[in-house]
Image (cartoon, rainbow, N blue to C red):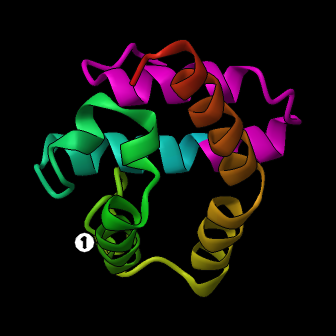
Amino acid sequence: MQTSKFPSVQALDQLLDGLGAGAARRRQLDMMRGELQRALERGALPVPAQRSLRRLLEEEALRPYVRIAESGALRIRRVGGGFPPTSEATNEIRRNDLGSDISSRICLAAWSSARSGRR
């Protein structure tokens, strides 16, 4: 995966590398990482989400991300000649990921960052 120009996605890459997820799980997480990258590139998320992992994963950024991702607009591969909405199974994976491992790691990362005075 290419290095992102966004510090928030660079921090997400480090976080994902440290999860120790299996291959299938990592593909799911990488899908979301790519969607977040594309949403930032399109200016679809708040500007602070470009600079801070904590901001990237706050409700203010995640709400539009999920809406846009579910619409199919963040797909990289065409399906039937277009970019249709993502499947319910993909949407469920996305919602579960946002509510589980990533969120708990983000809380820890945000806490560490706050303690060290970085943002």
Q: Nearer the viewer, residue 78 or 34?
A: 34
Residue 54, given in percent of the width and then of the height, sits at 46, 41
Mark 1 highlights which residue? 82
Residue 13, given in percent of the width and then of the height, sits at 55, 24
When the figure is inspected, residue 20 is found, relative to residue 40, above or below; the finding is above
The main secondary structure of the magenta stretch is helix
Position of 59 with respect to 93 (left or right) is left
The answer to which quarter of the image holds residue 77 is bottom left
Q: Nearer the viewer, residue 77 or 15?
A: 15
The magenta stretch is 1-29
Which quadrant is the C terminus positioned in?
top left
SS at circle 1: loop
Question: Residue at image x 39%, y 50%?
Answer: 35
When the figure is inspected, residue 36 is found, relative to residue 99, above or below; the finding is above
The answer to which quarter of the image holds residue 82 is bottom left
Residue 55, given in percent of the width and then of the height, sits at 37, 45
